[in-house]
Image (cartoon, grey):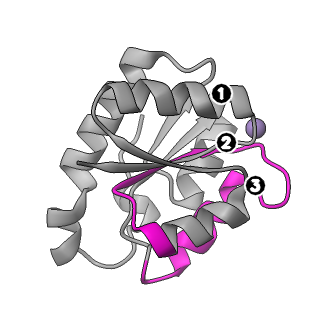
């Protein structure tokens, strides 16, 4: 069973995403800010991290940067979630090390397909042979 770490400060959003993913057969872990996300990533080794960008304590961009700088968790694919999706926002998300950006309000079928394709492309088997951090220039453009 694939394990997804859901990082989102809005409790309703976080629990709704968890319910949907659990319904689709994923195991979920929840974190309320970037600091909790880093701890959860290091202790629970999720297959993918869904990372809200606007959060108190430590925002999603800073949390993703820290995760990508830590060789024990840098291989875990991170997908950002944000209401902001200008070219500049997308660039910032990509520069931080996120592979994709899901625009809020989250479309459930997009969420599901994004998780599936990201795990298939960047999940554990490939990551074992891959460099420990993914360089920004290797990230897909979209
Ligand atoms: Mn938020």
Q: Residue at x 30, y 27 (%)?
A: 24
Q: Residue at x 55, y 66 (%)?
A: 40
Specify the farthest residue to the bottom.
Answer: 71
Q: Which residue is mark 1?
A: 13
Q: Residue at x 50, y 67 (%)?
A: 41
Which is more N-terminal, label 3 or label 1? 1
| Figure label count | 3
Q: Which mark is residue 34?
A: none
> Would you say the beta carbon of the disc 2 residue lies within 8 angstroms of ligand 1?
yes
Which is more N-terminal, label 3 or label 2? 2
Q: Which residues are magenta?
A: 43-72
Q: Residues within 10 Å of mark 1 (few under 14, many from 20)?
A: some
Q: CA distance from mark 2 to mark 1?
A: 7 Å
> Is residue 128 magenta-colored?
no
Which is more N-terminal, label 1 or label 2? 2
Q: Which residue is mark 3?
A: 59
SS for tag 2? loop
* Residue 36 location (% of width, % of height): 68, 63
- Vertical placement of 129 versus 94: above or below? below
- Vertical placement of 131 versus 3: above or below? below
Q: Residues within 10 Å of mark 2 (few under 14, many from 20)?
A: many
* Residue 15 location (% of width, % of height): 60, 31
> Would you say the beta carbon of the disc 1 residue lies within 8 angstroms of ligand 1?
yes
**Quadrant of the displayed image that contains ligand 1:** top right
Q: Are marks 2 and 1 in contact (CB under 8 Å)?
A: yes
Occupied quadrant, residue 83? top right
> Is residue 59 magenta-colored?
yes
Q: Residue at x 44, y 74 (%)?
A: 73
Q: Which residue is mark 2?
A: 8
């Amino acid at each position: 069973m694939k394990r997804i770490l859901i990082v989102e400060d809005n409790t309703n959003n976080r629990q709704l995403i968890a319910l949907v993913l659990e319904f689709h057969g994923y195991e979920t872990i929840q974190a309320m800010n970037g600091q909790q996300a880093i701890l959860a990533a290091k202790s629970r080794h999720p297959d993918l991290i869904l990372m809200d960008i606007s959060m108190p304590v430590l925002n999603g961009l800073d949390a993703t940067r820290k995760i990508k700088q830590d060789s024990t968790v840098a291989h875990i694919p991170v997908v950002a979630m944000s209401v902001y999706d200008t070219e500049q926002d997308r660039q910032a998300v990509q520069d931080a090390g996120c592979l994709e950006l899901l625009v809020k309000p989250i479309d459930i079928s997009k969420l599901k397909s994004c998780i599936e394709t990201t795990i298939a492309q960047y999940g554990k088997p490939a990551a074992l042979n891959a460099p420990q951090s993914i360089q920004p220039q290797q990230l897909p453009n979209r």
